[in-house]
Amino acid sequence: MPDPAWLSRDLVITTPEAVDFTYDLAGPSHRFLAWLVDSAVILIFIFGLIFTSALVAPTAGLMQAVFITASFATYTGYYIVLESIWHGQTVGKRVAGIRVIDSRGFRVSPGQCAVRNLFRLFDGMPLFYLVGGVTMLLSRRGLRLGDMAAGTVVVRILHLPSPERLLPPGERSEALLGDFALGERVRRTLASREKDLLISLAVRRERLEERARMALFTAAAGEFEKRLDIARPSTMSPERYILNLAAIAHAPRDKDTGLIRR
Amino acid sequence: MDLDRFISTRKGHWNRLDEALKRAARSGLDTMSADQLRDLGTLYRQACSDLVFARTVLQNGDLAEFLNRLVGEAYGAIYRRTRFSWAALQAWFLRGFPAAVRRHWRAVALSWVLLLGGLSAGFFATLADREAFQFIVPSEYHGLYGKKQGDLREARFGKIDADRAAGFSSQIYVNNIRVSFMAFAMGGSFGVLTVAALLYNGALLGSIAANFHRWGQDAEFWGLIIPHGAVELSCIALAGAAGFILAWALIAPGRRSRAEALAAASREAIPIALGCAPFLVLAGLIEGFVTPMESLGPWPKMTLGVVTGVAFWAWLLFPRRDHA
């Protein structure tokens, strides 16, 4: 089945500095996952309330009052409070890696959280979020009605490692990094595009599925071994070999002398 | 400038920005010193230009993706609206709620007309044709049909003591808060469901009232409705008005898109929808504890209802100079 066009769409925001940046809009699957997790959390919490209200309330009538009030506050307030204090996230949204933001790129305000979540009463009609689901499919940005009313969008948050962390301390190999002549060979031999490839491998490694990651790094390590004629020590994993090469290829140089700083 | 030079000269800045953002997320911008804030601004603008550079000159997708995230986070942290505070919440409730009601008096009036119109229609239809009662009122209340006063109290409240009253009032106010939130959200149906809900709830009350009118028990019946109903029906009408504010944005968005008009209308309507909640708790407590009291006759109870209702509307409609 081809993806609906909006699935691949980004939210582009232009800052007052006239710079564009983009957010990936979250699709129905991520939002459904978040909803599932949040529903489970609410259910468990309300289940716990049955016992706590029995413990704190001396009589049956008061117990009923405490339970009814607290469970209503829970399923109405859960999303509003968490999204307000966690900048647009709930437990489920954290699990799914998504966040609610103002459609202009700001953080959500408590008022927006209230609007989009009270609208669940209408988006949830008549069953299983039919109204919200249909508006999500029709809207350009994949919004349910509550999002439109609140002026919010749901975006994916990607935890990209900073370029600084290309080579974690635990992966350092002093045998490779400490060898100056080897370093010069790497820097001279490799074209800029090959160096970029090393960075891309390092940056994206956390996002790869386990088997694909193994296969990719094994293949890449084989290619660079041949290209550079630098043998990979038998105790070193292909991934670690590539990470160290990436660090060597992009080692900082002194501004004036152009020499590698140690 | 090639990629490795770029990263090695700039990554110190990016890490500092990342650190500053983490600090801001932990303890808020308010706790940062003037120097730290100036630093944050500078680092943010540098990251902006680095993002453009990575995209256009270096054309490295991964680096651009990283900077894109960094700029996005910084933008969200720097350009933002007022933060949540209890003082703001208080002002929003004490002043924002009544002010919104006054601004949207037309929507409030429309709500009342529909609610009272439904009530009269239900009342007169049931007086004219007894069958209308079976038609309007759901079967769970059919037990009330033709009952005398003593049975009426039993049917509605069972045997009431203070303990049962607590559970009973919580059920009532939770249900009513839910109904008023629904009325707000139903505005999304272009007002169709809001109109239907107001008319139907009015008709339901009118039809039951007509049934007791037939038995000459008006005082007893209204003695069971007015004490809490004055505030409760007011809140239902206000929630309906909140729904109409949204509906009007969808029907006549003007030059804006419907989504934009809806978002603007929601900001207007949400204080009304949320502001009703504490008053519905009050109405629920009256309904649970005061309404069923046998020692109090219908007239004192109705007086109580009228007084709370008048006080509520006086508070809503007359701005207080000392707070303004």
Image (cartoon, coloured by chain):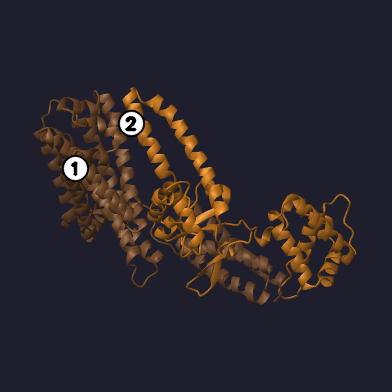
Chain colours: A orange, B brown
Name the front one of labels 2 and 1.
Answer: 1
Three-letter amino acid code of the residue under disc 1:
Gly
The residue lying at 15 percent from left, 50 percent from top is B314
The residue lying at 41 percent from left, 40 percent from top is A74
| Residue B61 percent location from the top left of the image | 67, 68
Q: Is residue A142 above or below residue B42?
A: above
Element under disc 1: helix
For the residue pair A108 and A1, the one nearer the viewer reads as A1
Element under disc 2: helix
Chain containing the residue with disc 1: B
Chain containing the residue with disc 2: A
Where residue B9 sits, quadrant-wise, is: bottom right
For the residue pair B227 and A177, the one nearer the viewer reads as B227
Where residue B19 sits, quadrant-wise, is: bottom right
Per the image, the residue denoted by label 2 is A65
* Few, some or many residues within 10 Å of mark 2 (<14, 14–19, 20+): many
Marks 2 and 1 sit apart, C-alpha to C-alpha, by 30 Å
Q: Is residue B216 visible?
A: yes
Per the image, the residue denoted by label 1 is B206
Q: Is residue B253 left or right of residue B106?
A: right
Q: Is residue B308 above or below residue A18?
A: above
Q: Is residue A81 left or right of residue A229?
A: left
